[in-house]
Image: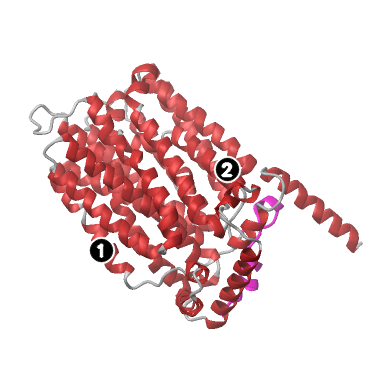
Amino acid sequence: MESETEDHKNVSLIENGKEEPKLPTAMYSREFIINILLMLAVVVSATSSGMAMGYPAVLLPQLKSNDSILYTDEEMGSWIASIVTGSMPIGSLISGFMIDKIGRRVTMHIQCGVVILGWLLAGVAQNHATMLTGRFVSGVASGLGMVAGQVYNAEVSSPKARGILSSAPFVSYAVGILLVYALGAVCDWRLVAGLSTIPPFIAIAMLFFYPESHVWLIRKGKIEKARAACVWFRASKTEKAGKEVEDLIARFSNEKLENYSWRCIFEPYCLKPLIISIIFNLLQTLSGVYVVVFYAADIIAEMGTQQLEVSEMLIAVLTALIRMIFSFVSCVLLHYMTRRRLGLLSAVTTSLFSFILGICVYLGVSSYFMPICLFLYVAANTVGLLVLPGVMIGELFPARIRGVAGGLSYTLFSISIFGVAKIYPFLKRTLRIYGLFSLFGVSSLLLCLWIYLTLPETKNKTLHEVEDYFMEESILWTNRKQRDRRRCDNADALMK
């Protein structure tokens, strides 16, 4: 049986100048397989939410045709596209309290039911009010599922598998977007809505076989159930599971003695990760990650690709395929690369291809170079910027306020996505497409700077170690590196 000490022998931070971590031999162990099984339920559930995000790209072109029974102009189309993200904050806020009150798994069950309701309303819509209601409900469901799924995955997974599991919902988002694009290319929008109810039904069935998070069970005083759940999560490694449960009990007992309440969210150790997450999410939204999801076909048409012998919808489907492929790539990279390095690489390359696209559109370039650059832009932001917000929800926030802080962070994230999606028609008219891509490039550069200065490295760190980091004074990770070097120098001096 591998001990935690042995696990950490292969782990070292790039920032301290040590070697890269080697692939653990437990990668293919029974415990790792159980972690993958846990991921599947969240993945299947989130797939339908990804389909809801990508639905406007196939829905709006059909509704804008003159023979549509539900004809939609540009203004109404912007509401149909953006209202999902506008209602996500409601689901996120509710989820933050629900996962702490009734549990992570039960919340995910409820989310699946709400997803089904949203798709049914959209599928049977005979007027815009019903369509908007269905899209609104789908947004609430997406908010519910994102926080619950991220927290559940982070709490039940082992540290070495946590990066892969935390990025899983975003992989499923990419799969859902590709799936709805592909269905929309050959099916009527009503049929697409009906088929989108299949993933949540599957997720409901799968979740019945999984235990509740042992972290939540301990907080509710259900110690024996927590032990049984932890043994299941750790592949029947009783000694390892027992030690983990005892450590959690001791930690939570100390928290109770210190009289923690929801007000602790305003304490520096809670406020710092929240600020890091909020600004990261805002700049990520302004880098165009979700704008391209919502308005793929429209943006491609505005780029001047009409002269190519390829339809805008086909290019949109290919962007979704690229997004899905690189979502899987990000899972692998999260295992091999540090979070900071992956984020910096993604932000820099996203900025580069944003500026290239902006310049090409401005100069009127019309060749296959344009869609290729768009594919590279999508690949660049998917591999890091798309998945890291979900990883942060699971890894940065202290356990005592993880539900509330995660809900608040995702709420503000959703509001920013809603705002950008809603004003896209205005931005397109005022900035033009080349100006829009320039905005994406500047935002990506600012995000690169923010990652470099503030984002702490959490790879192969236990959640307790991450919490302890935020107990320190500075919010800047660069200061942390300097303190680490001073500590090493002092230790070397003492040894001499």
Decide if residue 166 is on the left or right side of residue 400: left
Depth order, front residue of 423/62: 423
Q: Which mark is residue 425?
A: none
Residue 452 x, y percent position in the rendering:
62, 41
Residue for badge 1? 202
Quadrant in the picture for the N terminus: bottom right
Residue 287 x, y percent position in the rendering:
45, 33
Q: Mark 2–mark 1 contact, CB under 8 Å?
A: no
Question: Looking at the rendering, which quadrant does residue 113 occupy?
Answer: bottom left
Residue 124 x, y percent position in the rendering:
12, 45
Report the residue at 46% width, 51% height from top.
Answer: 330
Q: For the residue marked with disc 2, what is the amino acid?
A: Ile
Report the residue at 28% width, 37% height from top.
Answer: 316
Decide if residue 16 is on the left or right side of residue 161: right
The region drawn magenta spans 1-20
Depth order, front residue of 442/14: 442
Q: Could you give the CA–CA distance between mark 2 and mark 1, rounded to whole angstroms? A: 35 Å
Quadrant in the picture for the C terminus: bottom right
Tell me the crowding category of disc 2: few under 14, some 14 to 19, or many 20 or more residues within 10 angstroms, Cα based: many
Residue for badge 2? 276
Q: For the residue marked with disc 1, what is the amino acid?
A: Ile
Q: Earlier in the sequence, mark 2 or mark 1?
A: 1
Report the residue at 48% width, 71% height from top.
Answer: 217
